Image (cartoon, helix red, strand yellow):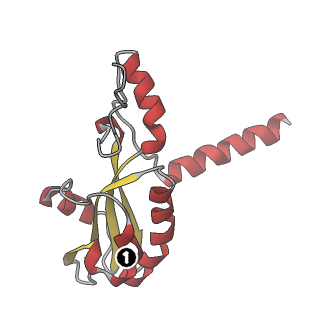
C-alpha cells in the first residue's frame, strides 16, 4: 500500500459469494416480533448484514400479501438496523418464497450477507477460488442423521 494511504473502507461492499436468503414462517403476523430481536442481534454483532427483507402473509384462503418490513408494527425494532435494505428480491423470488407458507401463516424472506464467513471467502479468493454454493439441510434429514449417530454411539459404547 502506498505510504500515507488508508485501506479502502469495505463496510458498504457486498461479498457476493456470501449472500443467501432465508424464509422464516410463523403462525401469524404478530408472531414476527419474536424473530426480530435475534435477527437484530445478528446484525449488531456483524455476523450478517440484511440486504433485503419482506413480510409475507398468507390468508386462510391462500392469498398472499407482501409487505415492506417498515410497514409492519411487529418488525419495528429492525427499523434501526443500519444499511440499505431492499432491491435484491424480485417479484418472482417473492412469489416462489410465498409457496413455502401454509394458509393462515406469515413469514419473512430475508436476504443476508453472511459476514461471519468473510475470512473463509477471502481465503478462497486468495487461493484463486470462491464459495460457490450452500444449502440448508431439511430438519427431518438432520434429525434422522442425529438419531442414527446416537444409536451408533449407544451400540458402540
Residue designated by label 1: 75
Quadrant of res 58:
bottom left
Quarter of the rendering occupied by the C terminus: top right
Quarter of the figure that contains the N terminus: top left
Is residue 51 left or right of 91 when viewed as pictured? Answer: right
Task: Determine if residue 35 is in view.
Answer: no
Q: Residue furthest top?
A: 127
Indicate the quadrant where residue 102 lies.
bottom left
Q: Residues within 10 Å of mark 1 (few under 14, many from 20)?
A: many
Q: Residue furthest front?
A: 4
- Image coordinates of residue 10 in percent, x first then y, are 34, 39
Decide: is 140 above or below 123: below
Q: Residue furthest right?
A: 157
Which residue is found at the position 36% from the left and 81% from the top? 29
> Could you say where residue 88 lies in the image, as x and y percent from the top left?
20, 53
Q: Is residue 133 left or right of residue 63?
A: right
Camera-nearest residue between 87 and 152: 87
* Number of residue marks: 1
- The reply to whether residue 97 is in sight is yes
Residue shown at the point (52%, 48%) measured from the top left: 141
Q: Residue at x 41, y 23 (%)?
A: 124
The quadrant in which residue 84 appears is bottom left
Say which residue appears at 51% left-offset and 54% top-offset: 45
Residue 100 locus on image (x, y percent): 31, 63
Residue situated in front as seen by the camera: 131 or 7: 7
Q: Is residue 144 above or below residue 108?
A: above
Q: Nearer the viewer, residue 29 or 72?
A: 72
- In percent of width and height, residue 107 lies at 35, 70
Q: Secondary structure at mark 1?
A: helix
The one nearer the camera, 67 or 80, is 80
Amino acid at each position: 500500500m502506498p505510504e500515507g494511504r488508508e485501506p479502502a473502507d469495505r463496510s458498504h461492499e457486498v461479498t457476493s459469494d456470501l449472500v443467501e436468503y432465508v424464509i422464516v414462517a410463523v403462525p401469524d403476523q404478530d408472531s414476527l416480533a419474536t424473530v426480530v430481536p435475534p435477527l437484530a442481534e445478528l446484525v449488531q454483532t456483524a455476523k450478517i448484514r440484511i440486504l433485503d427483507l419482506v413480510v409475507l402473509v398468507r390468508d386462510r384462503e391462500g392469498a398472499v400479501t407482501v409487505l415492506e418490513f417498515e410497514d409492519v408494527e411487529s418488525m419495528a425494532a429492525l427499523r434501526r438496523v443500519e444499511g440499505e435494505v431492499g432491491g435484491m428480491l424480485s417479484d418472482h423470488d417473492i412469489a416462489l418464497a410465498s409457496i413455502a407458507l401454509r394458509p393462515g401463516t406469515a413469514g419473512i424472506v430475508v436476504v443476508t450477507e453472511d459476514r461471519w464467513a468473510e475470512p473463509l471467502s477471502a481465503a478462497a479468493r486468495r487461493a484463486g477460488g470462491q464459495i460457490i454454493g450452500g444449502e440448508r439441510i431439511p430438519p427431518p434429514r438432520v434429525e434422522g442423521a442425529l438419531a442414527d449417530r446416537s444409536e451408533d454411539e449407544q451400540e458402540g459404547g
